[in-house]
Image: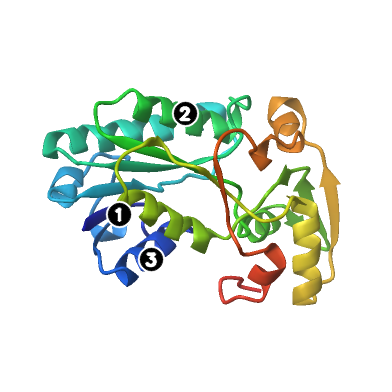
Amino acid sequence: MKIAVAGGTGTVGKHVVHAARERGHDVVVLSREHGVDVHGNVGITASIDGADAVIDVLNTTTLSTKVARAFFSTATTNLLAAEAQVDTAHHVVLSIVGIDEIDTSYYAGKIAQERLVRGSDVPHTVARAAQFHEFAEQIASQTTLGPLTVAPRTLSRPVAAREVGAHLVSVAESEPGGRAPDLVGPEDDTLAGMIRRMYAHDRTSRRVLDVRFPGAYGTGLASGALRGGQGPQRVAGTTFDQWLESPDHHG
């Protein structure tokens, strides 16, 4: 198969590319460093022409509802339009488990993205996954000031990005199904608990505050909705503690 990966240099994208190549697929990476700007609608059609599947793992970092909706809506619209031109047989998009009732902040963008995909004529599969183990590293780098790290109160079933990448390739190898089984991790966990164990593993001396964020976004994070639980699920095998011992953790 020829598989195009939008966002193929990111946290999940690099694992999608690795898994696809390991399975013998011809991989095209859609990223600015490869001369393709999906959000800016530059070079998409020529890059995906002849691809059997397009996997969309594009991402942006924002807590703004307006920015998230605009980014994911624009990028998805551009990608789907290009796929319609070249008759792409399968569009696979990565989304997040449990976000249906959290239509705000970053999750509002993902919900808007799903709606566009489901409403398009391009054969597609929405593949939702739980938060990543890598999220602990990312949040710690963004919310640490000196000896203190603030962690938004979050209950989920985290999964390794490497397993998400392999899962997305498996979905792309299958026929378009509308919605794939959700991919969740093997254990319930809190973000604060993950960061504390990461610090202990890395011998980092910092205090971690577990803070419930205000508003609908904070309520959604703390509610447990991000554990998934509705509909078919696939349970990944790598626990957070196992991930800490892997090369994917950059401690």
Residue displayed at 58% across by 27% down: 100
Q: Is tag 1's residue or tag 3's residue first in the polypeptide sequence?
A: 3
Question: Dot 2: what SS?
Answer: helix
Left or right side of 237 for 31: left
Q: What residue type is labelled 3?
A: Ala
Disc 2 to disc 1: CB gap under 8 Å: no
* Residue 67 visible in the displayed image: no
Question: Dot 1: what SS?
Answer: helix
Q: Residue 163 carries which label?
A: none
Q: Nearer the viewer, residue 16 or 153?
A: 16
Q: Which amino acid does label 1 sit on?
A: Arg
- Marks 1 and 3 sit apart, C-alpha to C-alpha, by 21 Å
Residue displayed at 72% across by 52% down: 143
Label 3, on which residue?
Answer: 19
Q: Residues within 10 Å of mark 1 (few under 14, many from 20)?
A: some
Q: Mark 2 or mark 1, which is nearer to you?
A: 2
Give above or below for 197 relative to 145. below
Left or right side of 94 for 102: right
Q: Which mark is residue 69?
A: 2
Disc 3 to disc 2: CB gap under 8 Å: no
Question: Dot 3: what SS?
Answer: helix
Q: Residues within 10 Å of mark 3 (few under 14, many from 20)?
A: many
Give above or below for 123 relative to 137. above
Looking at the rendering, which quadrant does residue 117 occupy?
Answer: top left
Label 1, on which residue?
Answer: 32
